[in-house]
Amino acid sequence: MKQTSTLVAVMLLISSYAFTPVHSSEIAPSVAGKYGVCALTEAESKACSVELTLNTDNTFTYFDHSDEANKIDVSGKWTLQEGDVVLTDYPAGVKIHRIWKTDKDTPCLKSRKGTTFYRLCRIGDVVTR
């Protein structure tokens, strides 16, 4: 009986390590980089209209110039929560897409805020700070 309970305890201990979630600092380098939506015409190709840069030190910069009357330029921190990139510590009152879902099939991030959907794809390498 004692051997059975010891064996069960050892099996439970081993299985608990099998399902341990991966820490976000281990995933961060694979997610870090520059993501954006760029202009489609040659005349507009001077700059991207929406861009999110995720640095390896968990800081970010975000700009959205898709609406010339309401340009957004913010920076702050980002974390990974259950596979989603969550933007935090940016100025209060600025309305941005705060939660970005990673796309497992492409190097892109997706977000929805109200009825607005954004999909940003990697346009640059990892930025290390």
Image: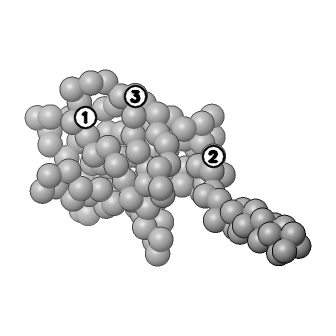
At label 2, the amino acid type is Ser
Q: Nearer the viewer, residue 122 or 92?
A: 92
Under circle 2, the secondary element is helix
Under circle 3, the secondary element is loop
Q: Is residue 116 left or right of residue 90?
A: left
Residue at 33% over, 60% down: 110
Question: x, y (%) of residue 117?
Answer: 21, 59
Mark 3 closeness class: few <14, some 14–19, many ≥20 residues within 10 Å? few
Q: In the rendered view of the protein, which quadrant contains the N terminus?
A: bottom right
Q: Nearer the viewer, residue 39 or 120?
A: 120
Q: Are marks 3 and 1 in contact (CB under 8 Å)?
A: no
Mark 2 closeness class: few <14, some 14–19, many ≥20 residues within 10 Å? few
Q: Are marks 1 and 2 in contact (CB under 8 Å)?
A: no
At label 1, the amino acid type is Ile
Residue at 87% over, 69% down: 2
Label 1 or label 2, whichever comes before in sequence order: 2
Q: In the rendered view of the protein, which quadrant contains the C terminus?
A: top right
Q: CA distance from mark 3 to mark 2?
A: 18 Å
Which quadrant holds residue 101?
bottom left
Question: x, y (%) of residue 52?
Answer: 40, 46
According to the picture, the residue beneath numbered tag 2 turns out to be 25
Q: Is residue 70 left or right of residue 53?
A: left
Q: Which mark is residue 89?
A: 3
Can residue 75 be seen?
A: no
Nearest-to-viewer mark from 1 and 2 = 2
Can residue 110 be seen?
A: yes
Mark 1 closeness class: few <14, some 14–19, many ≥20 residues within 10 Å? some
